[in-house]
């Protein structure tokens, strides 16, 4: 028996490869499926099942392409009704895989079709639970996403289901069962997930707030709903793609790999409604970019920020990337349902410059320069575009919190005629923020490279830190 976790950091997502006696099951595959097929070829095994824990919101699963290419059977748990051929497994059903067994455990709560898969080894011992978004390491799945698809499934109703699923079906398993979740820290599918990607159920019972043994159902509902922020806008759109189907990843990649010369790129930008997405590093972008392009760096938390900043997954996209990374970018866009990349700038931004095309820039200063500016003018306007929770933890005294997460609300606070100095935690989000606003006519935004880390390390600023109220210490 072989169990392999295939973890993708940019999505904080875990897919799983289980092999026994020449048969393979893949759980929650990413959209690009060739890596799974190659693993099976090396093992001289056949992919028999694609097991889906639920209709994913944060990425497009590879179930359709994997089934088409291998003949594998797509399996969902009870209540799932997708628009393609699949096997509806019953709660408690045993699925045979080589010399091992996989038990289907229906666990509604994150979504109504949410299902966990319990791996039983050759000796009959229950060894691992593939828990999807029902149980994370340190957290549980947020119960407010399904209502974006079905309004009658309120977050309170789903949270109540989740409580019952955890107490009656998961916490009754043996403490030494290993938990393999679908996500880890960085995913928007939970709020307190650990950076660890697996753990024993016993340790989770002792440390996970949502599994506290004496917690009542009302207390659980209050705890899991507390502090939830609105999910990215692309989540319900990905759910529908996973339910209804989508173009083959092969077609999406072929369509996106159309190389445009600078002249052709300019024509495409002018004659279509395509958005110009520049995925280079923030400071490379600041030093020169195509007018009206927005920057979301491929080496940061790329997919979630694309999903948050580009609300329409059918938006046509023209890419500017580092040379040689075009396919990587197109693939990572497709993972979250952005299938309409129509081409990229051949030769990258240098080709655009060499062709004598118009170039725009963003002024970027370091923390010491900002300190000098603040000394000269104590009324200097500073925008902190980190999340509200980060800002509340500590920030420059007098800085305005304008979270990138809610950029349209944040934009309404800004006077186009005034100059603002913009920072985030490390310089990634501030460049996204400025590039989007600059494309909307905000021309007086100055980036603070290095972000709050460099600001704090400089010791030149009055930092306001959150103080725990005395009453909470009693």
Image (cartoon, rainbow, N blue to C red):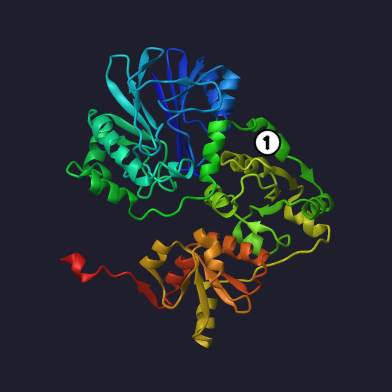
- Viewer-proximal residue, 186 or 53? 53
Q: Is residue 194 visible?
A: no
Q: Residues within 10 Å of mark 1 (few under 14, many from 20)?
A: many
Residue at screen point 53% across, 67% down = 410
* Quadrant of residue 215 within the rendered picture: top left
Q: How many marks?
A: 1
Q: Position of residue 437 (x, y in %)?
A: 62, 65
Residue at screen point 66% across, 72% down = 443
Residue at screen point 46% across, 39% down = 13
Q: Is residue 175 above or below residue 419?
A: above
* Quadrant of residue 54 within the rendered picture: top left
Say which element carries label 1.
helix
Q: Quadrant of the C terminus?
A: bottom left
Q: Is residue 43 above or below residue 264?
A: above
* Residue at the disc numbered 1: 253
Q: Is residue 348 left or right of residue 47?
A: right
- Viewer-proximal residue, 308 or 126? 308
Q: Quadrant of the N terminus?
A: top left
């Amino acid at each position: 028996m072989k169990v392999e976790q295939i973890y993708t950091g940019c999505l904080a997502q875990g897919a799983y490869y289980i092999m026994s006696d020449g048969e393979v099951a893949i759980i929650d595959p990413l959209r690009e499926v060739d890596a799974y097929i190659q693993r099976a070829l090396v093992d001289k095994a056949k992919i028999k099942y694609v097991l889906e824990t639920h209709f994913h919101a944060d990425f497009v699963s590879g179930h359709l392409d994997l089934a088409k290419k291998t003949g594998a059977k797509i399996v969902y748990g009870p209540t799932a009704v997708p628009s393609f051929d699949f096997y509806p497994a019953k709660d408690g059903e045993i699925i045979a895989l080589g010399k091992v067994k996989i038990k289907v455990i229906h666990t509604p709560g994150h979504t109504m079709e949410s299902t966990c898969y319990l791996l039983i080894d050759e000796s009959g011992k229950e060894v691992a639970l593939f828990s999807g978004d029902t149980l994370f390491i340190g957290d549980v799945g947020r119960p407010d996403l399904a209502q974006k698809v079905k309004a009658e499934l309120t977050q309170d109703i789903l949270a109540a289901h989740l409580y019952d699923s955890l107490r009656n079906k998961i916490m009754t398993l043996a403490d030494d069962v290993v938990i393999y979740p679908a996500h880890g820290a960085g995913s928007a599918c939970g709020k307190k997930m650990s950076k660890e990607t697996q753990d024993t159920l016993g340790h989770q019972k002792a440390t996970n707030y949502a599994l506290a043994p004496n917690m009542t159902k009302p207390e659980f509902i209050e705890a899991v709903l507390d502090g939830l922020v609105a999910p990215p806008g692309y989540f319900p759109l990905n759910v529908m793609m996973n339910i209804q189907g989508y173009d083959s990843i092969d077609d999406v990649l072929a369509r996106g790999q159309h190389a445009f010369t600078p002249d052709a790129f300019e024509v495409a930008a002018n004659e279509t409604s395509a958005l110009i997405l520049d995925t280079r590093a923030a400071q490379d972008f600041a030093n020169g970019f195509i007018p009206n392009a927005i920057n979301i760096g491929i080496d940061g938390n790329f997919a979630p920020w694309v999903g948050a900043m580009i609300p329409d997954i059918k938006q046509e996209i023209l890419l500017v990337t580092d040379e040689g990374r075009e396919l990587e970018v197109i693939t990572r866009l497709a993972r979250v349902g952005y299938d309409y990349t129509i081409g990229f700038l051949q030769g990258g931004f240098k080709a655009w410059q060499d062709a004598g095309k118009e170039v725009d820039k963003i002024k970027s200063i370091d923390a010491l320069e900002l300190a000098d500016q603040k000394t000269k003018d104590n009324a200097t306007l500073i925008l902190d575009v980190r999340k509200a929770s980060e800002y509340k933890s500590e920030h420059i005294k007098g800085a305005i919190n304008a979270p990138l997460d809610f950029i349209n609300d944040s934009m309404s606070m800004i006077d186009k005629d005034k100059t603002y100095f913009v920072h985030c935690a490390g310089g990634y989000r501030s460049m996204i923020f400025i590039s989007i606003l600059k494309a909307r006519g905000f021309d007086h935004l100055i980036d603070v490279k290095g972000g709050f880390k460099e600001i704090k390390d400089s010791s030149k600023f009055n930092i306001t830190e959150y103080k725990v109220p005395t009453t909470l210490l009693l």
